[in-house]
Image (cartoon, rainbow, N blue to C red):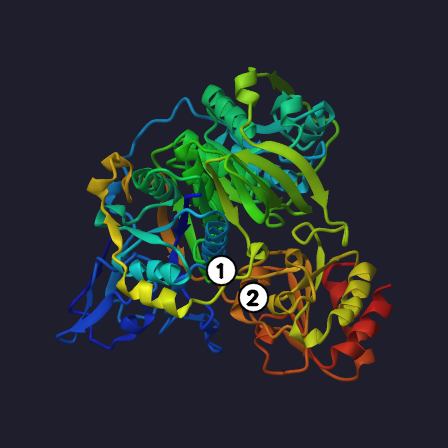
Amino acid sequence: MNIIVCIKQVPDTTNVRIDPETNTLVRSGVQSIVNPFDMYAIEEAVRLKEKFGGLVTVITMGPIQAEEALREAISLGADEAVLVSDRAFAGSDTWATSYTLSKAVQKIGKFDLVICGKQAIDGDTAQVGPGVAAFLDIPQITFVKKIEEIKDSFIRAERMTEEGYDIIESPLPCLITVVKEINEPRLPSLKGKMRAKKIEIKKLEAKDLDADPDSLGLKGSPTKVVKIFTPPPRKGGQMLEGEAKDISERLVDLLKGDLCL
Amino acid sequence: MSIRVINEKCVGCKLCVKACPFTAIEIVNKKAVINLDKCTLCGACIEPCKFDAIVLTKISPTDIQFPKKFDEYKDVWVFCEQKKGVVQSVAYELLGKGRELADTLGVDLCGVLLGENIREEAQKIIHRGVNKVYLVDSSALKYYQDEPYSKVLIKLINEYKPEIVLCGATSMGRSLIARVAIGIHAGLTADCTGLDIDKKERLLLQTRPAFGGNIMATIICPNHRPQMSTVRHKVMKEAQENKHHKGKIIEKSYDSQTYSSRTKFLDIVEEIEETVNLTEANVIVSGGRGMQSPENFKLLEDLAKALGGAVGASRAAVDSGWKTYSHQVGQTGKTVCPKIYIACGISGQIQHLVGMQSSEIIVAINKDPHAPIFSVATYGIVGNLFEVLPELTKRFK
């Protein structure tokens, strides 16, 4: 089973703190990490490979330093890595990103399954997975929390919804996006780390993709960002002190007042 | 789109170097130099610069080719999500906002409804003030499936040419609309919390949070139609019901090719452990590490029950196995926006805050007076939650 995993490098917010005075995000010294949801995508792909054989190729589109994210994926068991990087891709919105990634996937060639994390934690759009599926004209199962069965010709999976989950079956090739519940990612092995250091990462630039240049980057992006601003910070309010009984009574009164009950 | 350093203003203080998440800035000869191969134009360096020495031009005049005429595109559409034949409340919220937008533009507000045996629901949508409902009723559309739904919606859009299409940012909406936007080469902005109109250019101004709500971005779609957005649940006000409102139902049907699906829908499994789902709930009582054990979540369930709310959990509680993932609020869980969010024994790490800080009222109960959760709480209680919770439940009953 040949699997392609699409990942993204994002700023690590786990070490981010809030400046107590300005109540804004302190971003200094923020490192880059593999998008957390993509870690589940990598793990699921590696598990499937261990069970059925085949090849796991991990790809990312981003600036040159996104190579680090690919090396991390290799250390976790992926076989090959492709960096899709070109100044021509800068400013891509989800439409242009989906287009570029789908072109890169086609370039890599034969695959049975594409796995993406359900969304990236910096943009939070959850649009690129379905977008890539649409460009490749393959079926999709989004928000997968469990693969119930997968064979040569089909996959049956649980799609997480607001109320529970749907059970969906799809022929292969197919694209799935995964949520946290699907597995528990492993730590990199020593052997994996060694491989990650040595492996040659394949690079794809705009000219390698057989892509329409007008559909790439900012030019190919229907949406444009016109303004970026920091929202007014939420302020801490009133502290209630005293005995549990008194506090509860006051809180109930305050809430009733707020909600005009 | 470009970024540059104004050398006259730059003093080489390195604040931008620290702020850059992509190590794209270096100081060369006491001036900041941006490595454009590494820069993603994210804008993180703009604010930290005390000297306004970095300029990010998101749009240069050559990027927008005004005026491209879209005269044939008009009307505001709301995709009305239904489940088990019932239109979901998020659709009514979008109709509320959609009416405002349509009035500003001087066009019709239309609902789009796909499903099986849903004619009565179409009437309910009309009662929320729409001019038209596009109805496609087929057994193939009974349950949500990506392919038939996206093919039908693409056909409708191509035939009737709306200038704006809104859809709930639900699991269904996010899967569907992303596919549709590709198919018709439209711009799509995810998870909007604010929508407005630039009257002069007839542009939809779409505002959405990024970086977990720490940055807001306003996005436009100048050269493509329709302009499409998914919108967060619970952010917009529902359209009022008016049983006398009159509107037209335009029923369409399509060939079997359009209804066909490569995926098969096998079953719906509802996890009935708690009947209220987190994104729908008006009140959420959430527990974190401070709950100490899964048994103690009973206290939260009691309070939630008394308030008619749902139970949430922090990542720490979910990773400890005290609650299932479907309860997780925060960056790797759900983003919620209830009227009241009660955080119990949750310290309030940034990953949790981004999932709940847009709640209307936040109550925090924690024994640590320095817990970051208090910095966003409307009401903070420093105390023993095992004493406070039962008292609260008693009073709310």
Image point (27%, 63%), residue name: A198
Residue that badge 1 annotates: B212
Q: Which residue sits at x=50%, y=37%?
A: A152
Q: In the figure, is residue B200 to the left or right of A21?
A: left
Q: Which residue is mark 2?
A: B353
Question: Disc 2 or 1, which lies upstream in sequence?
Answer: 1
Q: Secondary structure at mark 2?
A: helix
Residue at position x 68%, y 49% from top?
Answer: B280
Residue A61 visible in the snapshot? no
Instruction: In this rendered view, identify the residue nearer to me: A134 or B204.
Output: A134
Specify whether A206 is left or right of A130. left
Q: Is residue A121 above or below residue B47?
A: above
Q: Are there few (<14), some (14-19), or many (20+) residues within 10 Å of tag 1?
A: many
List x then y, in percent, for residue A206: 23, 43
In what element is the residue under mark 1?
helix
Circles 2, 1 touching at the beta carbon (< 8 Å)? yes
Task: Give the alpha-carbon distance from disc 2 to disc 1, as whole Å.
Answer: 9 Å
- Please state the horizontal and vertical placement of residue A193, each as a whole percent of the image: 35, 67
Quadrant that contains the C terminus of chain B: bottom right
Mark 2 residue type: Leu
Report the chain holding disc 1: B
Front position in the image: B366 or A145: A145
When asked about the image quadrant of residue A156, the answer is: top right
Q: Is residue B158 left or right of residue A257?
A: left
Q: Amino acid at mark 1?
A: Gly
Q: Is residue B281 above or below residue B123?
A: below
Residue sitting nearer the eye, A232 or B289:
B289
Residue furthest out toward the left: B29
